[in-house]
């Protein structure tokens, strides 16, 4: 009986190996005929929302009324497509409906911004609903997200800002600590304290 079982194993084993090899050879052909992976409903929804957002006009907040000073600040805002660091860019467009308002668009978001008075003299545009602001300095601009606590775009420079940055490189302005501060010529002496 043992020789019979041994003979069956000797002949059956190679046949089993051959059948497994043939099955694995056919498996890649079936995998190639599968349809490409379908997007999940969440991915479809995100892409649809983004497409709708890109063509939907942003409504300015009707509760915000700009002052004459705000409108003067708005006249000094650089508009157009502004190049930023790492190949990014922002597009700043004046609102067609309300003077002094701007639509700022980046790769991932759009904001409706309006000027806000700044103590430092920098031009500041804010979108209070979305928690973002645009800060325009003499030689660069940046987009900040107050909600995320980080910069969304940095080192953004319009042609005017590039010209100023080049001028500052050639002729740097003295810093506060660069020039010596002269002490007053005389310091008035304190009167002695009255004794009793």
Image (cartoon, grey):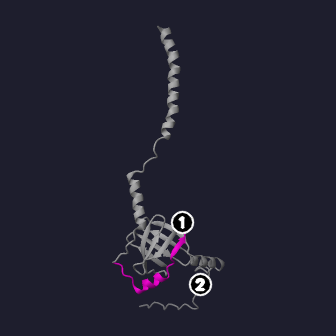
For the point 38% across and 54% down, the residue is 42
Q: Extreme front residue here?
A: 33
Looking at the image, which is closer to me, 182 or 192? 182
For the point 63% across and 79% down, the residue is 167
Q: Residues within 10 Å of mark 1 (few under 14, many from 20)?
A: some
For the point 43% across and 66% down, the residue is 54
In the rendered view of the protein, which quadrant contains the C terminus? bottom left
Q: Extreme right residue here?
A: 170
Looking at the image, which is closer to me, 133 or 37? 37
- Give the CA separation, mark 1 to mark 2: 42 Å
Q: Position of residue 153 (x, y in %)?
A: 51, 68
Q: Position of residue 160 (x, y in %)?
A: 57, 78
Looking at the image, which is closer to me, 4 or 157? 4
Quadrant in the picture for residue 48: bottom left
| Magenta span contains residue 162 | no
Q: Is residue 170 above or below residue 41?
A: below
Q: Extreme left residue here?
A: 63
| Magenta span contains residue 71 | yes
Q: Dot 1 lies on which element?
A: loop
Quadrant in the picture for residue 100: bottom left
> Seen in the image, is 185 located left or right of residue 144?
right
Task: Write down the residue under mark 2.
Answer: 181
Task: Write down the residue under mark 1.
Answer: 88
Q: Is residue 127 above or below residue 121?
A: above
Question: Which residues are drawn in magenta?
Answer: 63-83
> Seen in the image, is 98 located left or right of residue 27?
left
Q: Position of residue 12 (x, y in %)?
A: 50, 18
> Which is nearer the N-term, disc 1 or disc 2?
1
């Amino acid at each position: 009986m043992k020789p019979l079982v041994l003979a069956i194993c000797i002949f059956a084993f190679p046949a089993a190996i051959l059948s497994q090899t043939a099955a694995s050879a056919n498996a890649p052909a079936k995998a190639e005929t599968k349809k490409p992976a379908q997007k999940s409903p969440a991915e479809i929804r995100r892409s649809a929302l983004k497409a709708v957002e890109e063509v939907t006009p942003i409504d300015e907040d009707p509760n915000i009324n700009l002052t004459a000073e705000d409108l003067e600040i708005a006249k000094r805002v650089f508009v157009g497509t502004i190049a930023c660091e790492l190949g990014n860019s922002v597009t700043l467009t004046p609102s067609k409906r309300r003077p002094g308002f701007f639509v700022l668009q980046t790769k991932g978001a759009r904001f409706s911004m309006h000027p806000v008075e700044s103590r430092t003299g920098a031009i500041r545009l804010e979108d209070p609903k979305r928690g973002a602001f645009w800060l325009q300095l003499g030689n660069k601009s940046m987009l900040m997200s107050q909600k995320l606590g980080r910069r969304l775009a940095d080192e953004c420079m319009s042609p005017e800002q590039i010209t100023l940055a080049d001028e500052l490189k050639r002729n740097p302005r003295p810093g506060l600590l660069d020039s010596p501060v002269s002490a007053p010529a005389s310091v008035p002496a304190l009167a002695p304290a009255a004794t009793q």
